[in-house]
Image (cartoon, rainbow, N blue to C red):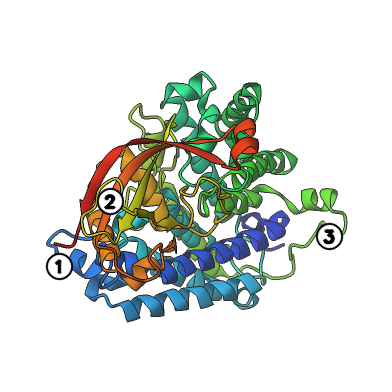
Amino acid sequence: MDWTSWFDAHDYEIARQIVQRGVGALTFVAFLSTLNQFRPLLGEHGLLPVPTLLRRASPLRGPSVFRWGYTDRRLVALAIAGMVLAASVVVGLPQLGPPWVPMLVFLALWIGYLSIANVGQTFYGFGWEMLLCEALFTVAFLGSNDQPPPITIVVAIWWLVFRLEFGAGMIKIRGGREWRDLTALMYHHETQPMPNPMSRQAHLLPAWFHRGEVLGNHFAQLIVPFLLFVPGPVGSAAAAVVILTQLWLIVTGNFAWLNWITVVLAASAISDPVWHAVIPVIPADLGTDSTTTPLWWFVVVGLVTALLLVLSWWPIRNLVSRRQLMNASFNRWMLVNAYGAFGTVTTQRIEIVVAGTLDAAPDDDSDWREYGFKGKPGDLRALPRQWAPYHLRLDWLMWFLPLGRMWEPWFETFLKRLLEADVPTLKLLAHDPFDGEAPRWVRARAYHYRFASRAEYRATGDRWVRTLEGEVIGPAALR
């Protein structure tokens, strides 16, 4: 018997395959999103140019290969390289070699995406950015097909899912009253940042169903995560509960890869015998017992495990704190972070609608034409699209505008780009009402949006009903 046999998680080979390939697939999507959106948002001529950030005296929030200089070409090269490496993981090529091969591939992806996130400013200020970085680092040490996955790394992934779920549950309990009186999901489907095709149908479900949703959420996030650490059927059942609740969020919303990666990581707690019991054609003993774990690999994984244990002190302290931080990293490498989402739920949806006109002297009677965004609501008749796990960064930031400072620096530049008919910026939108021609004036108005009732939809064909709240910017011209 191998002296490291206790170290090997023989019953979690399917879990390893799902986690490695799933994280690889979502990393591919993340780099694809960067390739398509980073340059108009943050590139040399973007809304918040990275070169301007690098010229400031203040240090970056973490390490980045762009610290020594940024160009759009370097960004494109990094994004494409990330997509190629991520695709190789999805098809399983690095996993065919010794364990150091997938380790180096995942660490390269981690450094690459960390470099992007650390210069991405507000456009990369989302919790799932650090979640992806932490997942890439942790999954790097799951090994290859030559030996069973290390049990300490499998448990480290369970610990990541625990922080993700329990942190979100605690932030809700400590947050808005709507989570305690069970009314949160009477609003959330309508007011979430980016609805999807099923969001309106979910919103129109009866109040008792929405209360049940909140109760189910509290059970899944406050109780179930503890059971993930019980190996075998109990941990597998806990993982199934997490996966099912995340699938409901996928069906009813567009939260980039947040829910998708939670599903992938939660699958790490489902053992091979449970997979075999549910799907008998899957062998119950896929894990290999024949290959001896190399001593050097044992040492590497041991050191990484010790590092993750030490870094766990800060998120543990955060979880028990009355001033719990939501989506916080306690080190520059985005490892062992604190997570949480929607501590409060907005009860009204306010949308910023941007429009332009060719008229020389604009007034309310001018021919104002509205710009259409890809994900955020605008056209009252349009059925929202499913975008997740792809992340529309501009649309998400537009949702945050009414919740904070209206005049953000990037938004001012965005309006200027519209007045210039800037092609890269217009490609971020779904509809340019001027077909490439530059408007003379633009304005921004705030509207209250709500889902149309079934009766209203039958009468008008509109999926949304909106009411003007007021004008917040404009009319504004280049001069």
Circle 1 sits in a helix, a strand or a loop, which is it?
Answer: helix
Residue under the image location 32 percent in, 61 percent down: 120
Which of the two discs, 3 and 2, sits closer to the camera? Answer: 2
CB contact under 8 Å: marks 2 and 1: no
Q: Within 10 Å of the Cα at label 3, are there few (<14), some (14-19), or many (20+) other Cα atoms?
A: some
Q: Nearer the viewer, residue 281 or 149?
A: 281
- At which x and y percent is residue 395? 41, 53
Residue under the image location 83 percent in, 59 percent down: 282
Which quadrant of the rendered structure holds the N terminus?
bottom right
Residue 115 in view in this figure: no
Residue marked by disc 1: 55
Residue marked by disc 3: 283
- At which x and y percent is residue 355? 34, 53
Q: Amino acid at mark 3?
A: Pro
Circle 3 sits in a helix, a strand or a loop, which is it?
Answer: loop
Circle 2 sits in a helix, a strand or a loop, which is it?
Answer: strand
Spatial CA span between label 2 and label 1? 32 Å
Q: Within 10 Å of the Cα at label 1, are there few (<14), some (14-19), or many (20+) other Cα atoms?
A: few
Residue marked by disc 2: 443
Judged left or right of residue 312, residue 363 is: left
Q: Amino acid at mark 2?
A: Arg
